[in-house]
Amino acid sequence: MRTGRLSFFLITAFCAILLTLGLPLLHLAKEKTPPVRADDLTLRLFQLLDTSYAGKLSEFYVLADVYTDPKTPDKELQHILKAEYDKERVFGRFRLYVRNLDKLTATQLKDYNLKQIYEFGDQDVEKFTKTDPGSFGRAGDLYSHSSANRPLATAPITDEARKEYETYITQWILPALEKK
């Protein structure tokens, strides 16, 4: 009996010491995210959307760059972007969808609105999801990519994906939002 009490006392004391000393150390081991710079691209975008658009943006379309098709060098394609933002969302406050389509003619640009043009594209080829300000790739950010006529699937956030996100935001989304 005596050894049972002694064992119980030692185990209880060990657990108490572990809880007292171990839990604060776990807090120190938590990954620290670097602070967001004041000139951060997404911070600037979120502030613009919060102040000028009351924290909500739905189905905002922008025609983006024209580029040559890597598979068929004599064919030109064009990106069209769809942006959505809701500051009340806990996850995925900002979403950016990218579609490809054949380069539009002047007549098509005149006859169709941007939503109709976006719907001409068969499917989204990329989707960027941002939850908090900071560079693309922080905790909570998602990147989806489709390839070879497959639907979007989550993909690793590479330097190329970060560069594309920054290009879409700086060259197309921010200027269009500031103009509107």
Image: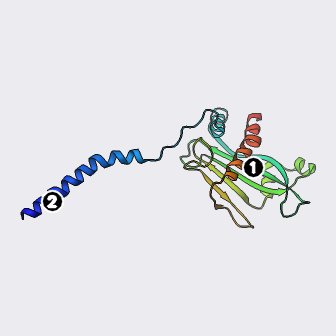
The image quadrant where one finds the C terminus is: top right
The image quadrant where one finds the N terminus is: bottom left
- Which residue: 67% across, 49% down? 162
- Which residue: 89% across, 51% down? 108
Q: Nearer the viewer, residue 55 or 19?
A: 19
Q: Nearer the viewer, residue 25 or 146?
A: 25
Which structural element holds mark 1?
Answer: strand
Marking on residue 137: none
Q: Nearer the viewer, residue 152 or 38?
A: 38
- Which residue: 65% across, 54% down? 158
Task: Tell me the distance, in whole angstroms, between the alpha carbons under discs 2 and 1.
Answer: 65 Å
Residue 48: which quarter of the image? Answer: top right
Which structural element holds mark 2?
Answer: helix
Residue wearing tag 1: 81
Identity of the amino acid at label 1? Leu
Label 1 crowd bin: few (<14), some (14–19), many (20+), radius 10 Å: many
Residue wearing tag 2: 8
Which mark is first along the chain, 1 or 2? 2
